[in-house]
Image (cartoon, rainbow, N blue to C red):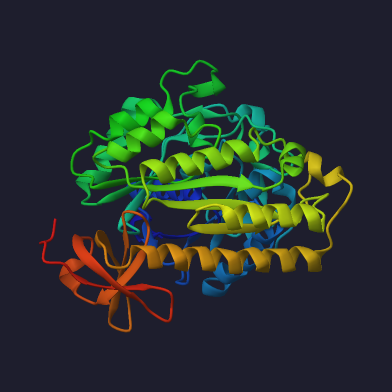
Amino acid sequence: MNLESKTVAFHTLGCKLNFSETSTIARSLQEHGYLRVEFHQPADVYVINTCSVTANADKECRTIVKNALKANPDGFVIVVGCYAQLKPEEIAQMEGVDLVLGATEKFNIIQYLDDLNKQSETIIHSCEIDEADFYVGSYSIGDRTRAFLKVQDGCDYKCTYCTIPLARGVSRSDKMANVVKNAYEIAEQGIKEIVLTGVNIGDYGKGEFGNKKHEHTFLELVQALDEVENIERIRISSIEPNLLRNEIIEFVAQSKRFVPHFHIPLQSGSDELLKKMKRRYLTALYQDRVQTIRQIMPNACIGVDVIVGFPGETDELFLETYNFLNDLPISYLHVFTYSERDNTEAIAFEGAVDQHTRKERNKMLRILSEKKRLAFYQSQLGSTQKVLWEHESKNDKMYGFTENYVKVEMPYDEQLVNQIQHVDLVMLNALGIVEAQAAQAVLI
């Protein structure tokens, strides 16, 4: 088979960081003559980029492998990502997997593609996570209206429930000049929005090899990116509350490109549980950050990560979390059900919460999240906002997001795709999406 005719398909599980890395791996293979196809199509090579935040992500990997083999039983299946680093032998037991690449090898994938015949035994190239001390810059492009730009990798925190430091290694960052260069490359593609991503992006500044010397701070990076021309919007994906300094909030409020949208992990509204989780803040600091944002940017969107069912979470402690979130002026929640992960401290903790209770608590918080989101959307009705229209169309409708992350729809107009337009937010429909109409202002 000629190299020109070889095809590759990708499936990404997990976070925005994984999407940015999949795109970088895809560009590398395309530069070596591979043609990218959709995952459901027959391909010579299937690359599955995995997550391992929850047990479900592990199970999902098994399903995706089966889907690849349905599309082409002779396809060469490669599994990379966090699950591949943590449990390569487990993946090797899955029928149909030919190659497992750990944290240091996933960006060298081309080196392993000399022989695409199905393997009788799965080949594993993993590493000790201490070896994952170098940095590979990544960004996603060509998939959507926005690009995910990786600025940082790894984590030095020791949260008792989390496997990410085991899967991704120490905290390390891209050089500021390289991040800015990547942002300009994204702008050249006509993409209007960049989402900054990493494992712990507020910790930005540690160099390669986990060098503790901070060359630049996250604030300095934000200030430099604000000067990148031809990018209309920059969004901060997720930042730890203890690293979200007032100076960052104040800068975003008056910046040219950064939008009023913050996603701030909380994990628990109980100080007792935050200490057991070894988080680096308590609820008073979290509340202070939310109030500071609200004072400076009243219309900002504030998203929250929260975990239910952590060991020792009694009914009383769960209600502490529920009431804390109910009282906070936030916009939506991402709710995670705690799942036991090997090689974490929490797996040995007493006070396990039964699965039924975990599900019930998850449901309660998801209902609260929907109430918060609808109330936030309702508060924005009657305003004029800038919306970036996306490619997706359904039932002759097109969709986009305002700067402060309100999802809106209008009748489909192909000419508006990937354009920013002033719209009036008119009403909330039965699906919980805001219906908009063009404002008198022209396209930007």
Residue in view at x 28 percent, y 47 percent: 233
The image quadrant where one finds the C terminus is: bottom left
Residue 98's spot in the image, x, y percent? 62, 55
Residue 276's spot in the image, x, y percent? 77, 39
Q: Residue furthest right?
A: 350
**Nearer the observer, 362 or 271:** 271
Residue 136's spot in the image, x, y percent? 45, 34
Toward which corner of the image does residue 254 lie, by quadrant?
A: top left
Residue 110 visible at all = yes
Reply above or below: 104 against 380. Answer: above
Residue 203's spot in the image, x, y percent? 51, 29
**Nearer the observer, 375 or 2:** 375
**Nearer the observer, 13 or 63:** 13
Q: With 73 as the anchor, is 26 left or right in this view?
A: left
Toward which corner of the image does residue 5 lie, by quadrant?
A: bottom left
Residue 111 visible at all = no
The image quadrant where one finds the N terminus is: bottom left
Q: With 108 as the anchor, is 118 left or right in this view?
A: right
Residue in view at x 57 percent, y 74 percent: 70
